[in-house]
Image (cartoon, rainbow, N blue to C red):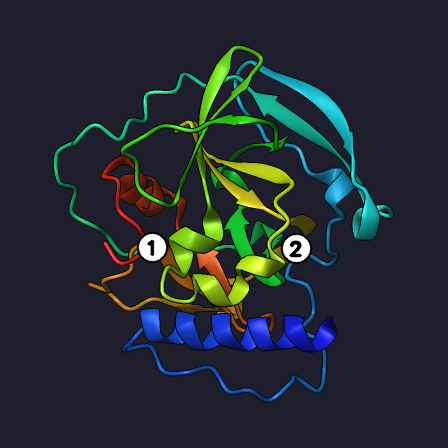
Amino acid sequence: MSKVKNANERVMYDYLNELLHPIASIPDETPTQEKADATGSTKAISDVAVNSAAVESETHELTGEDASVSMNLTDTTLDVGASLESPAPVKMATASVPEEPFQALYFEVAGLTMAVPLTQLGGIHNLSERNHLLGKPDWFDGVMVHREERYNVVDTARWVMPERYQQIQSDLNYQYLIMLEDSGWGLMCDRLITTEALSPDDVKWSKPNGKRGWLAGLVKEKKCALIEVSELIKLLNLGLNCNG
C-alpha cells in the first residue's frame, strides 16, 4: 500500500509542477533537519476552530487511521449562493504572498496530500448522501443537504487531476466535505491529517500572472498543493475544472 501511496504522491507532485509552470521544480532531496515551526509548535487537529458568524459546533470522531486524532469541527450555517448557471467570466488573479506565518489544514485525497489556509476554511462535515443532478460537469458530485442547508459537492481528485483520474480512482475513499469559505462549495477528501503553521518561505509560490490562480503554490517540505480558495471558487462558479 505504501508503494502505491508513494507512486501516487509522485504522480501528483509531477502534475502540480506542470500546472505551476514556469515555477522551477522543487528539489527531491529530503531535508536533513526539520524546519523549526514558525509559531513554535504544530497544532493538532483537536485545536482547530473556524471563526465564523453564527456557527454551531459538533464533535466528530475520526475512525481507522484517524482514531488517534479527534477534533472539534464547526458546522457553519451558509447562505449558499453558488450556482453553475453561466455566471459572468471572471479574470483569474495570482495568490498574494502573506507576510506573516499562517495555519493550514492538511487533508488527503487518494493518498495525496493537499492544504488549505484555515482562514479560508468554511467548515468540515461528514460526507453524506448526495442528490445527483443531470447536465453538470463530471467533477460535480451532487448536492448534499445538511441541516436544511444545501452544499455543492466537488469530486476533488477529478477536479484537480482530470487527466490522471483513472490512475488514482481506485484509491479514493471519500469521508469528509471541506467547505470553501462561505461559498456553499465543498471538496471531498478521504482523511483529515493535521493543521500546521507555515511561514511564507515554506511555500514555493506561484508566479505573477500565472494561469493556475487556484494553485497558490507548493508546500516545499511536504511537496503538496496549497489551495488559493477564492480563485478556486471562481472556477467552480463558472463550471470549470483546474484547466479553466
Q: Which residue is mark 2?
A: 196
Q: Residue at the far top: name it.
A: 148
The quarter in which the C terminus is drawn is bottom left
Q: Quick one: SS at disc 2?
A: strand
Instruction: Report crowding for label 2: few under 14, some 14 to 19, many 20 or more residues within 10 A (C-alpha).
Output: many
Q: Quick one: SS at disc 1?
A: loop
* Circle 1: residue type: Ser
Residue 96: give its label. 1
The residue shown at (23%, 52%) is 93
Q: Could you tell whether 206 is left or right of 72 in the image? A: left
Residue 220: give its label. none
Closest to the observer, 110 or 231: 110
Expressed as whole percent of the image width and height from the top left, the position of residue 191 reads 67, 49
Q: How many marks?
A: 2
* Circle 2: residue type: Glu
Residue 17 picture quarter: bottom left
Q: Earlier in the sequence, mark 1 or mark 2?
A: 1
Q: Could you tell whether 220 is left or right of 184 in the image? A: right
Q: Could you tell whether 146 is left or right of 18 in the image? A: right
Residue 33 picture quarter: bottom right
Expressed as whole percent of the image width and height from the top left, the position of residue 113 reads 58, 61
Q: Could you tell whether 58 is left or right of 102 in the image? A: right
